[in-house]
């Protein structure tokens, strides 16, 4: 089984803009640009605000238990549905969770975690 990974790092606005400018120059020159995927936060504090212990447990539970809905996830974690829904929405917004809407059933949303590892890179 191939282990998929997701890279998470700390990158300030200035560094992000520099990376963008370098990529743009390569594209204008007709050079190929390597596709890099990852999730970057402006600071360690911003990352900690998103990746707290409760949300990391949500990711782990989704990966291991594969709940059939957000409601089922809330039951597995013994947490309030509203709180889980808010956490899932945030995790989806930053790209750590994908959400599948089931059309046949009312408001059924299935959360997915499509990776096995999170790699954290913090520049010093």
Image (cartoon, rainbow, N blue to C red):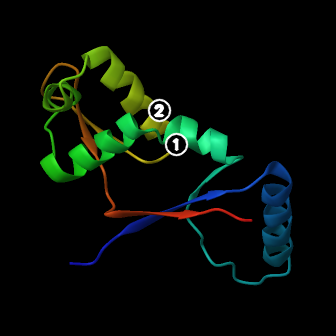
**Helix, strand or loop status at disc 1:** loop
Which of these two is toward me, 3 or 57? Answer: 57
| Left or right: residue 54 compared with residue 65 | right
| Left or right: residue 115 compared with residue 103 | right
Q: Are marks 2 and 1 in contact (CB under 8 Å)?
A: yes
Which of these two is toward me, 100 or 90? Answer: 90
As drawn, 50 above or below 119:
above
Residue 66 location, x and y as percent?
Answer: 16, 46
Name the quadrant of the C terminus.
bottom right
Question: Where residue 77 is drawn, which disc sits there?
Answer: none
Residue 67 location, x and y as percent?
Answer: 15, 39
Residue drawn at (65%, 62%) of the image? 122
Q: What residue did someone put label 1 on?
A: 94
> As drawn, which residue projects farthest toward the bottom?
31
Which of these two is toward me, 6 or 27? Answer: 6
Residue drawn at (34%, 23%) of the image? 85
């Amino acid at each position: 089984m191939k282990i998929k990974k997701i890279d998470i790092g700390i990158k300030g606005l200035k560094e992000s803009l520099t990376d963008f400018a370098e990529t743009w120059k390569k594209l204008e020159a007709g050079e190929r640009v390597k596709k890099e995927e990852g999730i970057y936060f402006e600071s360690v504090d911003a990352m900690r605000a998103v990746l707290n212990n409760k949300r990391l447990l949500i990711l782990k539970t989704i990966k291991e238990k594969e709940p059939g809905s957000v409601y089922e996830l809330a039951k597995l974690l013994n947490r309030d549905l509203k709180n889980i829904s808010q956490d899932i929405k945030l995790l989806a917004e930053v790209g750590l969770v994908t959400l599948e809407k089931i059309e046949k059933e009312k408001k059924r949303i299935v959360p997915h975690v499509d990776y096995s590892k999170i790699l954290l890179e913090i520049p010093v």
